[in-house]
Image (cartoon, rainbow, N blue to C red):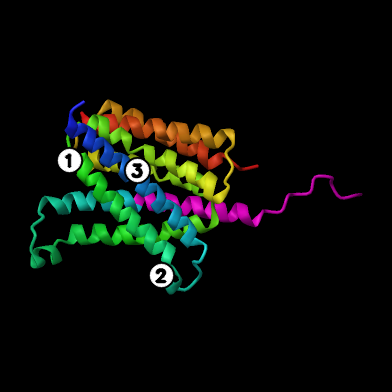
Amino acid sequence: MSPVLLRSMLLVFTASVVGSFGAVFLKFGSANVGKSVLSFVNRNLIVGVALYLGSSVFYGLGLKGGEVSVLYPMVSLGYIWTMVWSRIFFKETFNMQKLVGLGLVLLGVVFVGIGSGG
Amino acid sequence: MSSPAVVPIPQDDTTARRRRSILLVFCCTVLGAAAQILMKVGMEHFTLSVPALLTNLPLIGGYALYGINTLLLVVALRDAELSMLYPIIALTYVWVTLLSYTLLHETPNVYKNIGIGTIVVGVAVLGRGGRR
């Protein structure tokens, strides 16, 4: 594996982890959201948005490194981390339908990724 | 006559909220796709100068839609599980692909078509999951 590809894969991997924490902070921050617009300005939501922006920078840097047929499908990793965090931080449960639905979505994202790399 | 044994189960408040959250995320995916297409168009005549950026309406529109998108997503997340809503966001890929075919005249691709079909089925399964 070329060093450039390895570097890009690490960047995309990092982006997927950072982005998944973005989702976690948005979920934490959403608990403080009420009817007023100002309730949206809370620490967790700001951190969440910042993590999302950060992750898009990592994605941008990573995807520039060519081999998008390998890198695009890796984007779906973010879904897996988000599921792990929602289990750990929010004690969410997973029934069969949820797992099957998630599996299909993951497969679909990988296929779209392969198609985008062609 | 006694009342029938089957009493309609009162509509659970959490079910209604959950449904509203799914609808909100659905709207997010449409807005997100529109934002991506606008950004794509905007980046085509991108130049790094203040007047050019201020008159780049597709780019400004794209960013504005992303902003609205985030607000809607947060409201949706408040009332439903992250693990259920997050995968639904993948519907964005479906709309982006279809819009790229129709508006940007991209050549249809068999892998993308299989992918968006699979995502639609997956989201349908997720949307039904948890409904008792």
Dot 2 or dot 3, earlier in sequence: 3
Please report the residue visible at 47 percent of the width from the left and 56 percent of the height from the top. Answer: A27
Residue ID for mark 2? A41
Percent coordinates x, y for residue B1 in the rendering: 92, 49
The numbered disc on residue A31 is: none
Q: Residues within 10 Å of mark 3 (few under 14, many from 20)?
A: many
Q: Residues within 10 Å of mark 1 (few under 14, many from 20)?
A: few
Residue numbers of the magenta segment: B1-30
Say which of A82 and B122 sits in front: A82
Residue A77, above or below A48: above
Mark 2: amino acid:
Val
Residue B98, above or below B20: above
Percent coordinates x, y for residue A98 in the rendering: 54, 37
Mark 3: amino acid:
Ser
Circle 2 or circle 3, nearest the eye: 3
The numbered disc on residue A16 is: 3
The numbered disc on residue A64 is: 1
Circles 2 and 3 in contact, beta carbons < 8 Å: no
| Residue B43 placement, left or right of B8 | left
